[in-house]
Image (tube, helix red, strand yellow):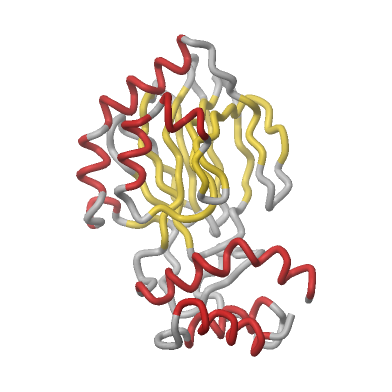
Amino acid sequence: MDVADVMAELRNAVGSRGLERVEECLRVLVGEQAPEYLHEDQEPTRLFFPGISALPWHDAAAQPWTAGMEAAYDAIKEEFLALRSEQARFAPYEDMYTKELGWQGWDTYQLYRNGTWRDEVLERCPETVKAVESTPHGPRDGMFTILNPGVHITPHTGGVNLLLTAHLPLIVPDGCVITVGDDERGWEEGKVILFDDSFIHEAENRGTQQRAVLLWDVWHPELTEAEVRALEFLMPRFQSYLMAV
């Protein structure tokens, strides 16, 4: 991959202003520049974006979209429960990027992948779609997830630092915890949590009932509008760029 060629394509698509950090990100990607990680527990193994804060946990309440998301809690939970009662297929979690496939006991119902909503979801979960669309959601995945009793999602990383992971907890029995970096926390039903999954993180259900959350990704809040437009253009192309490195 030639960074100059990619930047020329990008500037033609979205404009040329405010893309300095995007170009630096590409230079890190192809090995022309070494990444400068800001935290020892951060492992953006696939894609590192420079110049944005490295925090395991972000203050969800400080984000302008959080209140609206939490206001939709009852409607989202109702749609989730309807899927369960109708025996919609929940499959073991699969990550197409990190190759974490078939993680037993962590079951998911995919809402969107690569930023594209499934047709079935648009029909069955309109309130969930409406709520997520009101957030600065990114181009990775959105899903309902179930963590079964006794299951431990072992330490792993999402691999990129330019997106954060958001959870809207729907059902949270006792004994459920999530650890990001070295900070272990729980969930509270209806209260959004927000963390940087480029940090090593893990989750465990030590209880006797299933835990359920809505999980989706949002852009890091320190990215500019110009950078987000550029990354929306680039993200679907990164796999082909990597193959050309």
Residue 151: percent from the left, percent from the top? 60, 26
Say which quadrant the C terminus sits in: bottom right
Residue at 58% from the left image edge and 64% from the top image edge: 235
Residue at 53% from the left image edge and 46% from the top image edge: 141
Instruction: Give the image quarter of residue 59.
Output: bottom left
Say above or below: 31 vs 156: below
* Residue 158 horizontal side relative to residue 85, left or right: right
Say above or below: 166 vs 30: above
Residue nearest the viewer, comparing 173 with 13: 13
Residue nearest the viewer, comparing 93 with 230: 230
Residue 121: percent from the left, percent from the top? 47, 30
Residue at 68% from the left image edge and 27% from the top image edge: 104
Say which quadrant the N terminus sits in: bottom right
The furthest residue to the front: 12
Residue nearest the viewer, comparing 79 with 118: 118
Instruction: Give the image quarter of residue 109.
Output: top right
Say above or below: 87 vs 41: above
